[in-house]
Each structure stands twice: as structure tokens, then as C-alpha cells.
Image (spheres, coloured by chain):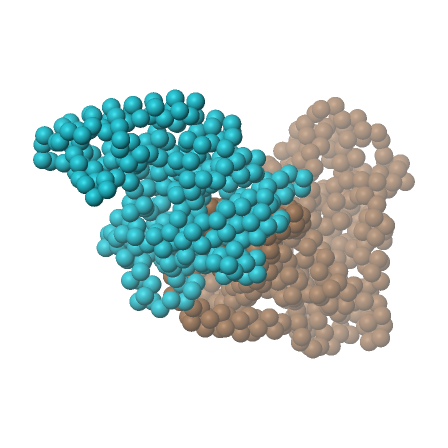
């Protein structure tokens, strides 16, 4: 659990971060979103004290971060950055082992952990452990960057535009592999991104910043359907449709769905609390052609044609829109 | 080539000694420079504002001519190994300092931020990330410094620190190409070997070799002390000779033969020699009879009572071809013939060396006093290329020739001042790079013609015989003409500080202790 209270950073007269507060529970992910210069990266870097706050408080499980040596604090926080920053003179294995080494882990423990992480992140240790960063693609390097951040099993993960420099396809792959990591359920994650869609896909809580101030701190659905002010509304407007895909769950449109039974047996299961985006993105091309969706709701399992599902969904969107407007 | 091998064979122990001295000088200065410049480079990478100042200052050090730098240290450090090491150390600073700074600067910010973000302390960021990544650049700097130092270390011979420069400068002074090569070739080889050795060290897996490195550094450290223990602590009379005097038949060997003396000698640059005797680093030097510093530094010339040194009458040495084309040149230069006696020349030298007048104004004042000065009337005629060696008297003589030629003829002049020795001037005359320069009959006789022992014996005491001999030989062999002697005899002179000489009752060279 991490709590930030009235965090402020002032450069000369300029308030880069102004009274930012939020709390993120263990297992949750918070996304800091905003335009360039909104103070999101500064906020993140104050948490691991790469930037010293001008005022405010950061509590890590009720202990005040400011009371500890910043070096100690950082070893409890995995850190992933956009430019990755792997050490070019270290092998992949040595790169991932940096923090365990700093913590004086036994060699065998470090190695086991590093190899396990490499396999989890789909950079097989057998092939990549002894290679150097320049021998890997950008996407693979960022996988190493993530493995490095997770290596010592820190309770907190800080990510600064972790997927920002990658092409859309690589980004999507890494993102989904990242989200599937079981370890994340026991960690508190804070990430900075300028990509709202990414924030909606990855985060439980989204904090929209502008000029150093929090505009709204809420879950994706609330942001979409109950924006706190015009800034938030304008900020989300461009991608409204895609965001709704990410935010709406099957159960939200349950009542609008048709009730016919499926005609074919090759169906896939989709949970009722899955977002529509994830429901669609799980279908392959072949499945899409004649797909039907099976949904579970209140103990019952039902099957639907995708085409009907989509029609219903569109209808729902129109309905919801007319309601908010 | 064969001559070179013969020279090596004959001087093997001397060569070995010089190579060791050379390695010692290069290595110690380099080690000290690394010890200072690497931490300094790291420090200025942390304090950006100091960086340009520190690098600028070391850059200025780099531009100071080596001889000037060596001369500057003699008052503080005396002569011998210490000033040489300090000078070499200063020259090695810039490349190492700048490369350390640049190397650290060039470590990508993302890598530094990641390192810090991982929870590395500042020290860990430096030692685990910045230094390893900057290492190739730092090593490149050390290699540059090494090559510079092997080269500059030849100049250590000028302050009595030994090294391969003894052969090189001895050879230049004595017009002995074999001797020059005997110093230059090993120096070049040393530069290449050192460079490759460091390249080799760079490739070693340093992280895995900590114990070996510690042992080697310890050994090198003690080795440094052995080298550092300077020869200059030897008791007895300290005598400073320049390489030319040391090697010439009519120099130190003649002195040993005629007087039966053996001295503790240190080899010094002729310009630094006077500085050394003034500061008391040496007790005796072999200078020139007309040197202005004799008066300035209160030195006493000891009488050459056994006629060890040959006559050194000074005349303009001119290419015959030019005299045929421009006969007026001879007429004009002969205006000075016989006019400059020892006392006059010493006075002129004194005015430049001690009263800090320029050679040009001293020359003009002298010519005016003799009613020989005329305003410049050059009309863009042929430019006579006049050369000089690197000492004051030559500068004054060249200024005299220059003003006479420009005032009395329509010829132009082109001055090539400060050529580094007899060999360079003489070779330039043969190739047409020079048309005229002031030369001394004794030098032409002993250094250029190198006559046999018997020929030397026959003529050495007779200045007219020497003049006729060189005139004939030069006309026939080199198409060069010695004009009429200017008057003074700038022969070698053994001199001591007047106080020391008077205290010991030294009047002539034969009064000196024999060893």
C-alpha cells in the first residue's frame, strides 16, 4: 500500500507538482496520466526520491519514506523507464541481477530468481542469459527492464512510460504478458503514461493531472461516465469509443444482449466482468468469422453470436451517450 | 644500418641504461598523472562548472614549450630526474583528465538514472556503471599520454635526467646521424610497445583479476622508488655539460686528456645549464667565452692553460653560388670583419641576455655606433635565407647581418631563427634551405669535417691553420665559403661561480681537483 499526501514540487517559482494526493492498495495499479509537463513524471520520481519533494508526505505501509535513506527506499521499489537504461557492459543475466546483488542475495538464489523471471517474461534464460543488451531487440530489452525491476520482488513497482518507445504491436504483446504476471497481485504499481487507452487497459485507478494538479482520481468507468470537469471530458473525448471498450464490462450491457442460444459449439468463454475490449481481443480471425460468445452471469452460462453482441454493445453506447449528454 | 648496429654494440650498456631511464621517466610520470587526473576527471564530471576551468588550465600547461617548462622548475627542483618527471607529469595530465571527464559524460543519462533508481549508492553508480563504461575512453587518453610522454621524455636529457634523449641530442650536436637513430629508434619502439601494452591491459578482464592487479601495482610502486632515487645526490663537484660538449673530441674528451680530470657530469641543455649554475645545482659548466651570462651571473672563466680547446673564430658561412650571383653580399658582410672582439661580443650578449634588450635593437645600436647602419632599402630582391642556432650570440649576429644586407643592398632577407644545432644548420645549407649562417671555425673543423687525430694535433693550437683548413675543405667539398672572421674567438670556456672559484683559488682549469 502506498499513500501520497499533498505532494508538492516547486522549481524556483514554478509549481511542477501541486498538492497531489492518492492512495494505491496492494495489488492495485494506478496510472498517472496527463499531457507533457503535467507533472506526472516528477510525481513518480518523488516517490523513489530521484527528485526530492518540496513538501508533502509519502507513506509506504504507514512508514514515512522521507525518514529513510533514499538508497534503501529505492531497493524496495522496482523501477522501469521508457529509455530502459540497461547496463551495456553487463549480460542480460547480470542486468536483471543488479538489485539482488545490491541486497547481497546468495548467488544460487539470485540465479534461480533471474532465470525464472526471464522465462516468465518470454526471454528464455537458456538463450538470452549470456547475451548483451545490444544483441536484443527493443521489445526484448524492455522485457529485461521489467524483469530487472521485479528481480528482488519489491512491494512497489514504478513505471515511467514503460511501453512508450515501442511499436504498437510489440507494446501490446509486452503489455498483455506483463498483465498476466501473477506477481503483480501482491504488488502496488504506479505507472506514468500519456496514453489514456493504455492507462484504461492496465490500471484500476487513473489519476489525470494537469499543470501539476489532480483533475480527477477514479476508476476508468467513473472517469468516462462521470468526468469531474471539462478538462477530463476533453482529455478523454478523442478516444471515447476505445475507452468504453476498455471500461465497459459484459455485465454492464447484459440487459441489452439478446437471449438466443448459439448455433455452433466452438465457442470461447468470457467472464461477465471482462471488458468488451478483452472479449474481442481474445478472438482469433477464424473465431471472429463465426464467433459466438459465451457469457456467465449470475451462475448461468449463455452463448451469443458476436455480431449480435456488437450490435447490442453499440446500442448500449448510444444509450449511455444520450444519457450523459 | 651496419653503422647503427656497430654503435649499439659499442654502447650497449649505455643504451640499456638510457632505455631504463627512459622507461622509468615515462612510467612514473604517467602513473602520477593517472593517479591525479582520473580522480580529478571524475570530480569535475560531478561539478560541471569547474570542468571548463580545470580542463582549460591543463590545456594551457600543455602549450608551454617543454624546454621552458623544464627551465621553470630548475630553481625549485634543481636538475636531474625530478624536474623531468614533473614536466612529463604535467604533459600527461590533459589527455587523461579530458578523456576521463568525457568518458563519464558520455555514459547515457538513462543508464545513470536506471542505476540510481535501482538503489545504487553514488559510489556504486561510479564504480559499477560510470567507470566501466568510460574505461575505453579513459584508456585511450592514457595511451595518448603515454605516446606523448615517450616523446617528450627525450627532452629529459636537457636537465640531466638521462634517457634516450642523450643519444638524440648528442647526435644532433655532433652531426652524427647514427647516434641520433640510436636514440630515436628505441624511443619510437618504446612508444609502440607501451601503447600496445596498455591496449593489452585494457582487454584484460579486470573484474576477475583483482589480486593480480594488486601485486603488479605494488611491484611497480617499488620500481618507481628505485628509479626515483636520483643520481644527483652524488657528492663532489657537479659539472654540467651540454650534449655537444660532452661528445665532441675537442670538448670533454680533450679536457680529460689535457688536464687528466674526471668529473661527475650531468647532461644539460645549453640554455638550462646557466640557470643550473646560477641556482647552484652544478658547480662548473662548459660555456662559451663570449656568453653574456658570464657577466650577468657573476661567473668566472677558468683559463685554458693547456690549450685543450681549439679556436672558434666566428664568420658568416655562405653558399658560394649566392656569392657569385650577388658579389655585393660579401662586401657588405666583410664590413664587420675583425670589428667584434671578445669583450664587444660579450657586452652585446649581456645586453640581450641580462638587460633584456632585443637582438634587433642591440644590433642596430652597435651598427649605428660604427656608422654602419643605414635605413632599410630592400626592394623585393632575392630573399637571402639566414639561419641561426639557438643561442643569443647567433640571434645578434643574424640581426647584424640582416640589417647590413637590408641597409646596404637591394636584397631581401628571410630569417630562420633558432635551428636546433650545427647539423640542422649545415644540412640546410647543403640542401639550399639556408644561404648563410654564423658558424665557428672550430665547429666546422671538429664537428663537420671530423679530421683525423694527427690533423687535429697539427693545427689545433693555431687559429690561422684551422681557418685555412676549413676554408679549403668547405670550398672543395661543400661549395660553402667562410668569409672573414668577425674578430672574437668564442671557444669553450670552463666557468664556475666567481665566489666558488675565489674560495678555492681556481684561476685556470689546471687548478681544479682531478676527479
B290 horizontally vs A161: left or right: right
Instruction: Identify the hue of chain B.
Output: brown
To which quarter of the image does residue A170 belong?
top left
The foreground one among A173 and B140 is A173
Q: Residue at x 25, y 39 (%)?
A: A272
**Vertical relation: B209 (above or below) A178:** below
Whether residue A289 is visible, yes or no, is: yes
The foreground one among A154 and A134 is A154
Q: How many marks?
A: 0
Q: Residue at x 34, y 52 (%)?
A: A185
Q: Residue at x 63, y 43 (%)?
A: A10
Q: Position of residue B394 (x, y in %)?
A: 73, 46
Image quadrant holding the N terminus of chain A, namely: bottom left
A14 horizontally vs B129: left or right: right
Q: Residue at x 77, y 31 (%)?
A: B406
Whether residue B125 is visible, yes or no, is: no
Q: Position of residue A234 (x, y in %)?
A: 48, 26
A37 horizontally vs A178: left or right: right
The foreground one among A35 and A213 is A213
Instruction: Identify the hue of chain A.
Output: cyan
Q: Position of residue A285 (x, y in %)?
A: 18, 30
Q: Position of residue B354 (x, y in %)?
A: 83, 52
**Vertical relation: A97 (above or below) B215:** above
Image quadrant holding the C terminus of chain A, namely: top left
**Vertical relation: B513 (above or below) A39:** below
Amino acid at each position: 500500500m502506498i499513500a501520497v499526501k499533498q505532494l508538492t514540487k516547486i522549481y524556483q517559482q514554478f509549481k511542477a507538482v501541486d498538492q497531489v494526493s492518492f492512495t494505491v492498495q496492494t495489488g492495485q495499479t494506478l496510472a498517472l496520466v496527463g499531457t507533457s509537463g503535467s507533472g506526472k513524471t516528477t510525481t513518480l520520481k518523488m516517490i523513489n526520491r530521484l527528485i526530492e519533494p518540496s513538501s508533502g508526505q509519502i507513506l509506504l505501509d504507514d512508514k514515512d519514506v522521507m525518514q529513510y535513506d533514499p538508497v534503501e527506499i529505492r531497493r524496495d521499489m522496482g523501477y522501469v523507464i521508457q529509455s530502459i537504461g540497461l547496463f551495456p557492459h553487463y549480460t542480460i543475466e547480470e542486468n536483471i541481477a543488479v538489485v539482488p546483488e545490491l541486497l547481497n542475495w546468495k548467488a544460487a538464489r539470485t540465479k534461480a530468481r533471474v532465470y525464472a523471471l526471464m522465462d516468465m517474461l518470454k526471454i528464455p534464460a537458456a538463450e538470452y542469459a549470456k547475451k548483451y543488451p545490444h544483441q536484443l531487440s527493443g521489445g526484448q530489452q524492455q522485457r529485461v527492464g521489467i524483469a530487472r525491476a521485479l528481480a528482488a520482488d519489491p512491494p512497489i513497482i514504478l513505471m515511467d512510460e514503460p511501453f512508450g518507445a515501442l511499436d504498437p504491436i510489440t507494446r501490446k504483446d509486452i503489455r498483455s504478458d506483463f498483465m498476466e504476471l501473477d506477481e503483480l497481485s501482491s504488488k502496488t504499481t504506479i505507472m506514468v503514461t500519456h496514453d489514456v487507452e493504455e492507462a484504461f487497459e492496465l490500471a484500476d485507478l487513473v489519476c489525470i493531472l494537469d499543470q501539476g494538479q489532480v483533475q480527477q482520481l477514479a476508476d476508468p468507468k467513473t472517469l468516462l461516465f462521470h468526468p469531474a470537469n471539462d478538462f477530463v471530458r476533453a482529455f478523454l473525448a478523442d478516444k471515447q469509443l476505445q475507452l468504453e471498450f476498455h471500461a465497459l464490462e459484459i455485465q454492464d450491457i447484459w440487459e441489452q444482449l439478446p437471449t438466443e442460444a448459439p448455433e455452433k459449439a466452438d465457442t470461447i468463454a468470457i467472464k461477465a466482468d471482462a471488458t468488451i475490449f478483452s472479449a474481442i481481443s481474445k478472438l482469433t480471425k477464424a473465431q471472429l468469422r463465426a464467433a459466438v460468445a459465451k457469457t456467465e452471469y449470475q451462475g448461468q452460462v449463455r452463448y451469443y453470436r458476436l455480431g449480435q453482441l456488437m450490435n447490442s454493445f453499440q446500442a448500449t453506447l448510444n444509450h449511455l451517450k444520450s444519457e450523459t449528454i | 644500418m651496419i653503422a647503427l648496429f656497430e654503435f649499439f654494440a659499442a654502447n650497449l650498456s649505455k643504451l640499456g641504461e638510457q632505455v631504463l631511464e627512459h622507461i622509468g621517466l615515462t612510467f612514473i610520470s604517467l602513473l602520477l598523472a593517472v593517479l591525479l587526473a582520473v580522480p580529478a576527471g571524475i570530480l569535475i564530471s560531478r561539478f560541471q562548472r569547474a570542468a571548463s576551468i580545470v580542463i582549460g588550465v591543463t590545456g594551457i600547461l600543455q602549450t608551454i614549450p617543454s624546454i621552458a617548462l623544464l627551465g621553470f622548475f630548475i630553481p625549485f627542483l634543481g636538475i636531474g630526474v625530478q624536474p623531468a618527471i614533473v614536466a612529463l607529469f604535467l604533459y600527461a595530465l590533459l589527455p587523461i583528465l579530458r578523456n576521463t571527464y568525457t568518458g563519464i559524460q558520455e555514459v547515457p543519462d538513462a543508464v545513470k538514472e536506471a542505476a540510481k533508481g535501482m538503489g545504487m549508492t553514488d559510489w556504486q553508480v561510479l564504480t559499477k556503471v560510470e567507470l566501466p563504461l568510460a574505461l575505453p575512453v579513459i584508456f585511450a587518453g592514457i595511451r595518448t599520454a603515454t605516446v606523448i610522454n615517450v616523446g617528450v621524455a627525450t627532452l629529459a636529457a636537457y636537465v640531466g635526467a638521462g634517457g634516450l634523449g642523450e643519444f638524440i641530442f648528442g647526435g644532433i650536436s655532433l652531426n652524427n646521424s647514427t647516434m641520433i637513430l640510436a636514440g630515436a629508434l628505441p624511443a619510437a619502439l618504446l612508444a609502440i610497445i607501451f601503447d600496445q601494452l596498455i591496449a593489452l591491459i585494457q582487454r584484460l578482464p579486470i573484474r576477475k583479476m583483482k589480486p593480480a592487479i594488486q601485486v603488479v601495482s605494488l611491484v611497480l610502486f617499488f620500481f618507481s622508488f628505485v628509479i626515483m632515487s636520483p643520481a644527483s645526490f652524488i657528492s663532489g663537484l657537479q659539472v654540467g655539460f651540454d650534449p655537444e660538449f660532452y661528445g665532441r673530441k675537442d670538448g670533454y674528451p680533450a679536457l680529460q686528456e689535457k688536464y687528466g680530470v674526471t668529473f661527475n657530469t650531468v647532461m644539460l641543455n645549453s640554455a638550462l645549464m646557466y640557470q643550473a649554475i646560477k641556482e647552484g645545482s652544478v658547480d662548473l659548466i662548459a660555456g662559451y667565452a663570449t656568453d653574456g651570462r658570464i657577466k650577468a651571473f657573476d661567473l668566472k672563466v677558468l683559463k685554458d692553460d693547456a690549450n685543450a680547446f681549439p679556436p672558434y673564430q666566428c664568420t658568416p658561412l655562405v653558399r658560394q653560388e649566392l656569392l657569385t650571383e650577388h658579389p655585393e653580399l660579401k662586401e657588405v658582410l666583410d664590413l664587420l670583419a675583425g670589428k667584434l672582439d671578445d669583450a664587444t661580443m660579450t657586452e652585446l650578449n649581456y645586453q640581450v641576455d641580462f638587460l633584456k634588450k632585443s637582438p634587433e635593437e642591440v644590433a642596430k645600436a652597435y651598427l649605428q655606433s660604427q656608422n654602419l647602419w643605414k635605413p632599410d632599402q630592400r626592394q623585393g630582391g632575392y630573399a637571402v635565407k639566414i639561419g641561426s642556432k639557438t643561442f643569443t650570440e647567433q640571434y645578434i649576429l643574424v640581426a647584424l647581418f640582416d640589417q647590413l644586407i637590408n641597409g646596404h643592398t637591394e636584397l631581401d632577407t628571410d630569417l630562420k631563427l633558432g635551428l636546433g644545432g650545427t647539423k640542422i644548420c649545415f644540412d640546410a645549407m647543403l640542401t639550399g634551405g639556408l644561404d648563410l649562417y654564423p658558424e665557428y671555425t672550430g665547429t666546422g673543423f671538429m664537428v663537420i669535417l671530423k679530421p683525423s687525430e694527427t690533423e687535429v694535433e697539427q693545427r689545433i693550437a693555431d687559429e690561422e691553420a684551422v681557418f685555412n683548413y676549413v676554408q679549403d675543405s668547405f670550398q672543395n667539398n661543400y661549395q660553402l665559403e667562410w668569409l672573414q672572421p668577425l674578430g672574437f674567438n668564442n671557444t669553450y670556456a670552463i666557468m664556475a661561480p666567481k665566489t666558488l672559484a675565489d674560495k678555492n683559488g681556481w684561476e685556470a682549469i689546471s687548478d681544479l681537483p682531478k676527479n
